[in-house]
Image (cartoon, helix red, strand yellow):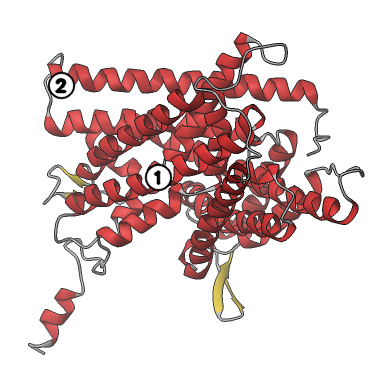
Amino acid sequence: MDNTKPLMELELDDDGRIRRTGNVLTASTHIITVVVGAGVLALAWAMAQLGWIAGIGSILAFSSISIFTYSLVADCYRYPDPVTGKRNYTYMQAVKAYLGGTMHVLCGLVQYTKLAGITVGYTITSSTSLVAIRKAICIHQGGHTGSCKFSNNPFMIGFGILQIFLSQIPNFHELTWLSTAAAITSFGYVFIGSGLCLSLVVSGKGAATSITGTSVGPELSAEDKVLRVFTAMGNIALACTYATVVYDIMDTLKSHPPENKQMKKANVLGVTAMTIVFLLCSGLGYAAFGDNTPGNILTGFTEPFWLVALGNACIVIHMIGAYQVMGQPFFRIVEMGANMVWPDSDFINKEYPFKMASVTVNFNLFRLIWRTIFVILATILAMAMPFFSEILSLLGAIGFGPLVVFFPIQMHIAQKRIRKLSLRWCGLQLLSCLSFIVSLAAIVGSVHGIIKDFHKYSLFMYKQ
């Protein structure tokens, strides 16, 4: 018995939970996997609106801010001391510990609104890629003479039906095979898209580019140019954001050395790799298409047929898994709230075991009905607004200012007890204000773009 007790103690962390084994390398991998997503494909369009100087500068600026603020977030993982304090398992929990209940509620509203919105964005992204595959098949079979425009709606409905089934599986994010497939495919479509753009540039068929981006003229007014620049900022902000899962990543790190020190190193490595990928994808995409850069660079190609189809198939596979990874936290918070309000309700709380292949899941009536309704509503919203760049920009704008800058800075000020109106306090608040202005501008640009697209297309009649 004397030999068994120390072994059992070794298997537990300081909070009594199973000992974590993650390290800097695994955390860096998680960061890269999260940020290298479909938003990367919109960065070439963003670069086209901003031009070479502002485009590259914006990506570097957003990346630098991310390295700084996520380091502040890492120091707030434990409360009150960043090394010996009590662990905060979620972003909301950390905000509550350092800033109180009001900020906790505000953080939750922003975080879960963004998570819900991302499911709409992923539905649009998947349908865009499926239509691109269908279009590539059409052109491959009949050439460019025939009509190869298709509605996104059937593909969104099919994607939504699949997600209805997948959403019934509780804690789906624990199925590691799906996360692994999503990670592999995310790199697949990014490098396929970049490679196709590179081949176009090397062959001498690239388009003219500019240090100031798209030119103002008969087809683009000065007002629209400014609003497109705002939207482009939102696209870059979305691509740089992983705040919704930052504490989930930290919660995998072993206790020694301290989690905050490991996370700071992982943040630098992950964001640096992310920045290189972003510059590569956006620069090559803009060099290939110039002012006519599409919102999703893969949709600009139809040949070679098999490679374009493979790249778009990779996006769809990634979106299937990513939808659940982002949707599950939102599902969980709603179900926890329902459980607290109606703790004795069998409809909400009773579980029915159901075995599917080698996986046993718990069937629940409330989960079945409410998750199905949510997926249907997300699908309908996506069908009504299937505008790739604008929706991604809006999601980025909603999350960047509050989650990436405001809350980390306010928690840091509270933790370090930085004196009000001191030089450091003023500098931090200035950064927070600037990020708020950028987020607000991106929201204005995105909403304007969505309204403008509504005037071009009838409701539910968009064709790509």
Which of the 4 image quadrants contains residue 210? top right
Residue placed most toward the observer, 171 or 225: 225
Name the residue nearer the viewer: 426 or 374: 426
Task: Tell me: 158 left or right of 354.
Answer: right
Sort mark 2 into few (<14), some (14-19) or many (20+) by Cα contacts within 10 Å.
few
Q: Quadrant of the N terminus?
A: bottom left
Please give the label number shown on residue 424: 2
Q: Is residue 25 above or below residue 264?
A: below
Q: Position of residue 143 (x, y in %)?
A: 87, 49
Element marked by disc 2? helix
Is residue 388 visible in the rendered image? The answer is yes
| Residue where numbered disc 1 is placed | 276
Instruction: Determine the residue positioned at 55% across, 48% down.
Output: 194
Q: Residue furthest front?
A: 204
The answer to which image quadrant residue 30 occupies is bottom left
Would you place residue 368 above or below residue 147 in this image? below
* Viewer-side residue, 203 vs 382: 203
